[in-house]
Amino acid sequence: MGEKPMFGLTPGRVLTRNYRVDRLLGMGWEGEVYLVSERLTGVHRAAKLFYPERNPKDKAATHYAMKLERLRDCSMVIQYHHAEQIRLQREPVSVLISEFVEGELLSDMVNAYRGKRMPTFEALHLTRTIAAGLAEIHERKEYHGDLHSHNVLVRRRGIHFDCKLVDMYDRGRATKAHIGEDVCDVVRILYDLVGGKKHYAAQPDVIKKVCCGLKRSLIEERFPTAWHLCRHLDTLEW
């Protein structure tokens, strides 16, 4: 993870009276996420602690919780449970408790492949899964806002991939531009999955017809929504 966590909660520490810290799961711009266990049942949950300076008047935490609640029926959204407030280092800290999802970050998964890139079919199959989950979010007039391989959690299930979003961002009310940005981000994920710029020239047409050389105007013209991208992937000819 590189940087040292600001809160640095140690395993075994009691958090919000009801939970015990197991380990740090990750860090981001807004805060830190820990694996925690319910003290009564031992059930695992995820606890996101917001940095006070990044959460003025609880705006970031409230927005994130409300967004998760609005999207609770979407397959790619982690289920939000409740919020609590604790004091750490003499400051009030907001904590959001949500389901704990098994899996690994997409960035870590790709790094485990030979040459750090996925075979064509696997990459397209995974991209289709992400695009379909994103389309559900867009149908509810919401968006992700900063989609990349470091905030997609992936778990293999037979020949399928289960994906969840680790973070979602607030960039104002959903607009056509936000939707378009999300679609471009999914295409960029595919581009990176198969090797990025270094290997793009040698990619087959099925990849190039989706990636469009990462030219945003071409991507948005070909795939105005995530569902357009899904339909294209569903009708590919090999």
Image (cartoon, rainbow, N blue to C red):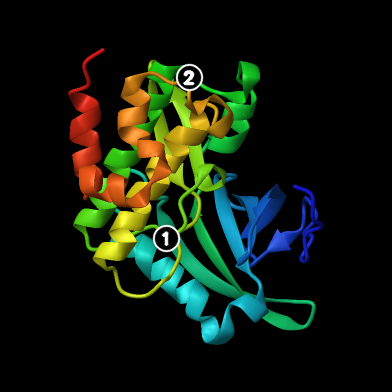
Residue for point 42% across, 58% down: 80
Which residue type does callout 1 highlight? Gly
Q: In this view, does 146 lie above or below 221?
A: below
Q: Name the residue under label 1.
A: 145
**Mark positioned earlier in the residue sequence (1 or 2):** 1
Mark 2: secondary structure: loop
Image coordinates of residue 152 in percent, x first then y, are 49, 43
Image coordinates of residue 128 in percent, x first then y, are 31, 32
Query: Is 91 positioned to the left or the right of 187 in the image?
Result: right
Among the 4 quarters of the image, the one containing residue 28 = bottom right
Q: Name the residue under label 2.
A: 202
Image coordinates of residue 39 in percent, x first then y, are 63, 53
Q: In this view, does 6 lie above or below 1?
A: below
> Viewer-nearest of labels 1 and 2?
2
Residue 18 appears in the picture as rendered? yes
Residue for point 37% across, 33% down: 127
Image coordinates of residue 35 in percent, x first then y, are 63, 49
Mark 1: secondary structure: loop
Which residue sits furthest top? 238
Most foreground residue, 35 or 62? 62
In which quadrant will I find the C terminus? Answer: top left
Which residue type does callout 2 highlight? Ala
Residue 142 appears in the picture as rendered? no
Q: Is residue 56 above or below residue 28?
A: below
Which residue sits furthest front? 201
Most foreground residue, 100 or 228? 228
**Disc marking residue 135:** none
Marks 1 and 2 in Cβ contact (< 8 Å) = no
